[in-house]
Image (cartoon, rainbow, N blue to C red):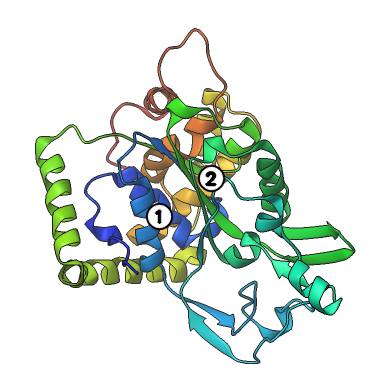
Amino acid sequence: MTQPYPFSAIVGQEDMRLAMVLTAIDPGIGGVLVFGDRGTGKSTAVRGLAALLPPIDAVEGCPVNSARIEDVPDWAENVSNKVKRRPTPVVDLPLGATEDRVLGALDIERALALGEKAFQPGLLAKANRGYLYIDEVNLLEDHIVDLLLDVAQTGENVIEREGLSIRHAARFVLVGSGNPEEGELRPQLLDRFGLSVEVTTPRNIDDRVEVVRRRQAYESDTTAFLKRWRAADTRLRKKILDARARLKSVETPESTLRDAAMLCLALGSDGLRGELVLLRAARALAAFEGAEAVERPHLRRLAAPALSHRLRRDPLDDAGSATRVARTVAETFGTFQTAAE
């Protein structure tokens, strides 16, 4: 099995990489939506993130990756009483997946052979405490979108059918990627992503050459390439762990709260989800950078990823949503950073 391309070896795409790192620091941010051209490293980054993420402690044999033995669902079978460290789960949700495959269903083979009712866990069980990745998320069938919305809202998967009554934890970071030319994402699901970033084909010749050079090196001698980038991935993993440890101690001053509210009001964003995500992501960024408090520069850096996909469409404004956010940030906070920032 081919090992994933190292996360640290990805050339450019800083917004995408930062967004994914922030969700690794604080999964409560709510996931990442990556839209852009084909061949810009969207799926490569997700798979590289899987190898980069720190492992989790999970009960051996538990189908939902429970951290403690007492949290193992009562329907789970053949579960050990040992807790072992395992890689953070990253689960692919294919476009053609059925409802049974996603949620889980009655184990038909067992029911026919033994006459017993048993639950066969789905993809949501495997993704608990990890990442659920959907490529071409904008092409996902509507009824699957509805299921994901329900689970994302509650953090719990509930199956009531075929004589089964099953519940299990289903808390995961949703990562979606797609090409906007192939269709739009339903607003209800769009709002469930904490951060949204756009990736484009590199326009700099040196960057394009470096992408090709690294990819050729990876394909010609994967082992040597992985060894070359192992130290960089290890340093990044340590920074993520350090940021997790200091996250709770990062303060959010009153002035920063007012800045976030002022910015969201100026943008006309609906509800308060935008402010909550912006502040949460900014706090993770502050922890990642070793800052003691969330300040205006953190809000500036994450305003577009946190807010651009929550804006109402303006038929009189041809500018893209990220451009509108950048313009409003400049109008609200000033074009240049002050010495205090």
Q: In this view, does 299 lie to the left or right of 130?
A: left
Name the residue nearer the viewer: 297 or 43. Answer: 43
Q: For the residue carrying disc 1, how many other residues have a C-alpha within 10 Å: few (<14), some (14-19), or many (20+)?
A: many
Q: From where the camera sits, is residue 198 visible?
A: yes
Give the structural element (helix, strand or loop) at label 2.
loop
The residue carrying mark 1 is: 46
Residue 89, percent from left and from top: 51, 67
Asked whether the residues under the numbered discs 2 and 1 touch, taking CB atoms below 8 Å apart as contact, a structural biologist would say no
Q: Is residue 249 left or right of residue 126?
A: left
Up-down relation of residue 81 to residue 143 (above or below) = below
Rendered residue at 36%/43% (across/down): 297
Q: For the residue carrying disc 2, how many other residues have a C-alpha within 10 Å: few (<14), some (14-19), or many (20+)?
A: many
Tell me, for residue 76, which label it has, or none.
Answer: none
* Quarter of the image where one finds residue 186: top right
Q: Earlier in the sequence, mark 2 or mark 1?
A: 1
Q: Outermost residue toward the bottom?
A: 81
Up-down relation of residue 132 to residue 276 (above or below) = below
Name the residue nearer the viewer: 38 or 294. Answer: 38
Give the structural element (helix, strand or loop) at label 1.
helix
Rendered residue at 23%/45% (across/down): 12
Name the residue nearer the viewer: 276 or 229. Answer: 229
Q: In which quarter of the image is the N terminus?
A: bottom left
Up-down relation of residue 129 to residue 140 (above or below) = below
Q: Is residue 311 left or right of residue 145?
A: left
Q: What residue type is labelled 2?
A: Gly
Residue 312, percent from left and from top: 57, 22
Tell me, for residue 194, which label it has, or none.
Answer: 2
Residue 324, percent from left and from top: 42, 22
Q: Which amino acid does label 1 sit on?
A: Val
Q: In which quarter of the image is the C terminus?
A: top left
Residue 62, percent from left and from top: 64, 79
